[in-house]
Amino acid sequence: MESARSTNGFAITALIFGIIPCLGGILGIIFGILGLNQIKRTGQNGRGLAIAGIVLGSIWVIASIVVIAVGINDKPKRDDSGHVTQSGDMDVTQLRVGDCVADLGDKDFYTTTKAIPCAQPHKAEVYALLPLSGTSVPPQSVLDEKGNEGCSTALESYSPSAFEDDGVEITYLYPTKRSWAQGDHSIACVAVFTTERTASIKGK
């Protein structure tokens, strides 16, 4: 009389973690290897499940590496002086004075934007960062007052011609409670252009 062989538990677990990419598929690989080793000793069923877990886990690992690599390569690059030399997406809290932006668009809330070399067509430029004091985000009225007055004065100093140009609008980005807690304690003054430009407005 033959007895039915049980299916190895590690092999089953490997398949589960191969389908559900916990830790980027690494667990599928680990449990798959453990399952194969145990199956060799015990003669249990589940070799195919273990192999499937390893294969699927490997696919998730490769996919994770590709996503990370793309994310790193998609960030803007700067030269030694801090100027953007290669365009890329970045957190708005990382914007610097002189950074040109492809297009801010018309939003009420920004988390990321595309920084671009100023020699390339763009529709906005950061021209000032106004520091904010205090232990928490100032009231909206304070942010608006500082943004309206401070950014207007800053643009006149940064680019007198842009200050007089009807094709240049002033906007500003201010911190949220979340970004404040992460160290974002300034208002970013941004000159927005009605038509694309291919040079910085600084000093003009």
Image (cartoon, rainbow, N blue to C red):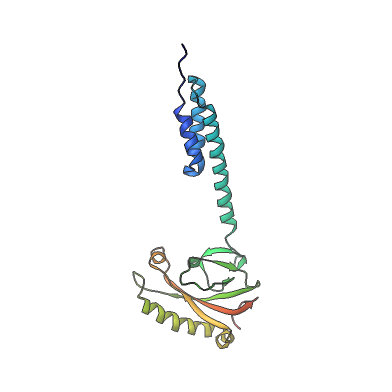
User: Front-most of 63 and 132?
Assistant: 63
Q: Is residue 47 left or right of residue 121?
A: left
User: Front-most of 88 and 130?
Assistant: 88
Locate the C terminus by quadrant. Answer: bottom right
Residue 153: % across, % down: 48, 85
User: Front-most of 196 and 11?
Assistant: 11
Is residue 151 among what the camera can see?
yes
- In the image, farthest residue toward the front: 1
Tell me the quarter of the picture where residue 87 sits.
bottom right
Residue 13: % across, % down: 46, 34
Q: Is residue 79 left or right of residue 130?
A: right
Residue at (62, 79) in percent of width and height: 195
Residue at (56, 39) in percent of width and height: 58
Residue at (47, 31) in percent of width and height: 12
Image height check: is 106 above or below 76?
below
Is residue 82 among what the camera can see?
no
User: Front-most of 123 and 118?
Assistant: 123
Tell me the quarter of the picture where residue 131 sits.
bottom left
Residue 99: % across, % down: 56, 71
Residue 25: % across, % down: 51, 41
Total number of numbered labels? 0
Image height check: is 39 above or below 196?
above
